[in-house]
Every structure is written in structure tokens, then in C-alpha cells.
Amino acid sequence: MRSDPGPRYYKFSESTQVTLKTLSEHEGLPEHKLAQNLIAAGLSEYYSTDELMQKWEILSARERDVAALICLGYSNQEIAVRLVITTGTVKTHITNLLRKFQLDSRYELRNLLAEWDFSAWEK
């Protein structure tokens, strides 16, 4: 535990300082404010990604398959053929996926996972 309750100050590398100065000039913000904003945005992204991964990990293997194929643009019929299941089963998996991710549509699921790489499911 720290004995000094005052604010902490950190040093950035020279290249980071140059980048921060350039960005602060571009954004019209003082460097310390821009640094705070960038750190807050990074932490928010970190926790969002962690929360998303926790949700992914509670999915069954089949639900992961369906989610990946949805994100790759497959229709329900194409998913059914690819996974050798009925379209009714695909719909059930989609319902479960949307509930677990607290979403309303497969479109929202695709947007939520847009940055993820599902190319392994294409093989």
C-alpha cells in the first residue's frame, strides 16, 4: 500500500511522448487530458473484450460453431447443411446464443463479434 496519497506520475518513452504531443495538437486537447482519455478508452476496451470472452466461453461447442458460421455470413440452411443438423436445431442454437449474449438479432451478433477471426471454421 502506498504511503503517499497524492497523484502518481508516469514517464512515457520518447516515441510515445512525440505521438502524444502530435495527437494532442491534432485533437486540440492538453497532453495529460488526451493521455487520460486514451487510457480510459483502452481500459474500457480491455474490460469489454474480457466480458465478451467470458460469454463466449459459456457457449457449447455447437453454439460456437453456429455463432462462427453466422459471423461468416452463412444462412440457417447453409449452417444446417454444414453441421449436419436441422434448420430447427440451428434456430434453437441461435435463440440460445442471442439470449446468452443478451442480443436481439443475428445482425447484432455479427456486429458484436465483427473483429474476431472465424476463418478456422471455413476449413
Image (spheres, grey):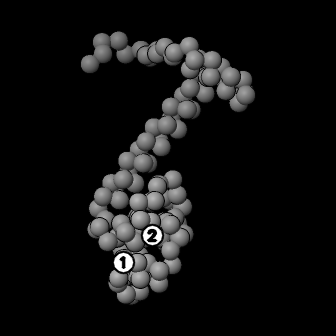
Q: Residue drawn at (47%, 42%), measured in percent from left and top? A: 44
The amino acid type, in three-letter code, at marker 1 is: Leu
Residue designated by label 1: 83
Q: Quadrant of the C terminus?
A: bottom left
Placement of 37 over or under 111, stated as above or below: above
The answer to whether residue 77 is seen in the rendering is yes
Placement of 19 over or under 111, stated as above or below: above
The quarter of the picture where residue 4 lies is top left
Report the front residue among 107 and 81: 81
> Looking at the image, do the residues carrying marks 2 and 1 touch, with CB atoms under 8 Å apart?
yes
Q: Position of residue 112 (x, y in %)?
A: 50, 59
With 103 as the anchor, is 92 left or right in this view?
left
Q: Residue drawn at (45%, 60%), measured in percent from left and top? A: 118
Mark 2 and mark 1: Cα distance apart in space = 10 Å
User: Furthest residue to the front?
Assistant: 123
Per the image, label 2 sits on a secondary structure element best described as: helix
Q: Position of residue 38 (x, y in %)?
A: 55, 32
Q: Residue drawn at (48%, 43%), measured in percent from left and top? A: 45
Placement of 3 over or under 84, stated as above or below: above
